Amino acid sequence: MSTSRNIQLSIDVQMSNQMTEVKGGGVLLYVKEKFNASEVKLQNQFPEQVWCRIKTNDNREVLVGVCYRTPSENVYGNGIHENIRELVREISCKNFVLFGDFNYRGID
């Protein structure tokens, strides 16, 4: 028996990075409109990521991102590990929150 559920979200802004090179790939970030988020494109070449910038009440900026790293090296190759390290270096001097599925053994 299969069941289907409809999920209703009260979220106003959607940002996504849909992958065209890989079937089923991509990440999605939903942000409530009251946070006045704006999408940010980082310099990093990590393929499955999406970011936004949110200003806090005291006018500071916080980056919020979602990343997905496939457990299969056959999809993006060995260089994906370095891409993640470069991503962290790029955002490390900023205020940020990073969500994701990194598929690294030992950190679940």
Image (cartoon, rainbow, N blue to C red):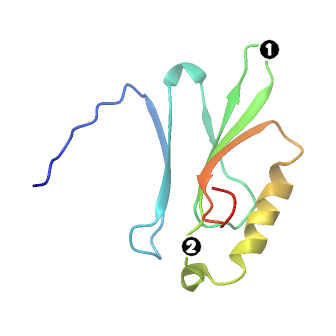
Residue 27, x across and y down, in percent? 50, 55
Residue 63: quadrant of the picture: top right
State whether residue 67 appears in this view: yes
Residue at screen point 67% across, 52% down:
41
Q: In which quarter of the image is the C terminus?
A: bottom right
Residue 76, given in percent of the width and then of the height, sits at: 60, 80
As shown in the figure, which amino acid type bears the numbered disc 2? Answer: Pro
Report the number of discs.
Answer: 2
Disc 2 element: loop
What is the residue that sits farthest to the right in this orientation?
93
Provide the residue designation for mark 1.
58
- Mark 1 residue type: Asp
Is residue 51 positioned above or below 9 on the image?
below
* Picture layout, residue 8 above or below residue 100: above
* Residue position marked by numbered label 2 in the rendering: 71
Specify the farthest residue to the left: 1
Query: In percent of the image, x 69 and y 74: which residue is there?
Result: 80
Question: Measuring 37% from the left and 25% from the top, which residue is drawn there?
Answer: 10
